[in-house]
Amino acid sequence: MFNKLRGLPPIIESKLAFPLYGIIGGVVLIVYGLVGRARARGRANLPLNPAASRADAGRQVVMGKAHSPSPLNSPVSNTACVFYLEKTQALKYARYGQNGRQESRGGRLVEAFGGFFVRYGTRTAFVVPFAGSADLCKPETTKGFVDGIQKFEQIIKEGEDVTVIGTPRPLADFMAYLRRDAGISLPSDSIADLTRMEKDPGYSGMPCFYADGLESVTDQPYNDYLARTASSGLAYVLAGAVITAASAAALVYFNGR
């Protein structure tokens, strides 16, 4: 079939190219959705709030209340919080034409700031989310463009329920990682508190979730988060199937003309 593309007028070739791109894009969506659903199923069997407080207990899920002795103020709404995601988007240009206002916006720059303790039962873990691990479901807060820049934020407040998924490591490992200037953004007061805790043998086994040992942090209960990620994966699969089928039908139609 694809050999027939050779020698066709350019306008026909372009009509055949779009369905091919559609098929490729649809397959990518299907694979992405299947991976997301498989990840959700894999997380469903993880131990929840392990009885051991050791940091070497393996991959696990912790649910509890977020707490920080060093509160932050979020950059957009100036709301007290323990962690925030700041997303910045630049307006490249805006002009008015026959179709009204036309805008071109750049990609979003996402930065994470803060770390917090998670209290679950009588135990405590320390969590330092990064942009790729923070999967918050609350809506973004934003303001209009200021000097061509628009900012968005999502936050975790003091006392808010959170779910953490990952493989923790002990406090000493985290402090060594922090001292290597690994790009972690923490308030200076938090670093001072952690330095004092490091010297206390009672905190030596405190689990710390950070860097590649932190898979996901969400502001939903564990079961709700699993349901959301599985549902999202299914939506990608269905969208990919529709796009692939429609593109394949268009390819057959144009190729037969």
Image (tube, grey):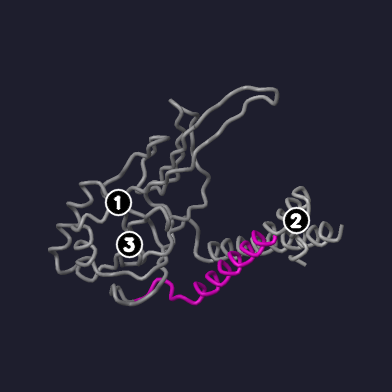
Query: Sequence-wise, which precedes: disc 1 or disc 2?
Result: 2
Q: Mark 3 or 1, which is nearer the eye? A: 3
Q: Which residue is mark 1?
A: 68
Q: Are marks 1 and 2 in contact (CB under 8 Å)?
A: no
Question: What residue is rendered at 32% in x and 76% in y?
Answer: 52
Spot occupied by residue 166 in the image (x, y as percentages of width and height): 39, 68
Q: CA distance from mark 1 to mark 2?
A: 57 Å
- The residue closer to the viewer here, 116 or 98, is 98
The disc placed on residue 16 is 2
Q: Mark 1 or 2, which is nearer the eye? A: 2
Is 163 on the left-hand or right-hand side of 7?
left
Disc 2 residue type (three-letter) = Leu
Crowdedness near tag 3: few (<14), some (14–19) or many (≥20) residues, C-alpha within 10 Å:
many
Chief SS of the magenta region: helix
The disc placed on residue 210 is 3
Spot occupied by residue 89 in the image (x, y as percentages of width and height): 47, 37
Q: Quadrant of the N terminus?
A: bottom right
Give residue 255's quadrant in the image: bottom right
Disc 1 residue type (three-letter) = Ser
Disc 3 residue type (three-letter) = Tyr
Magenta highlight range? 23-51
Q: Quadrant of the C terminus?
A: bottom right
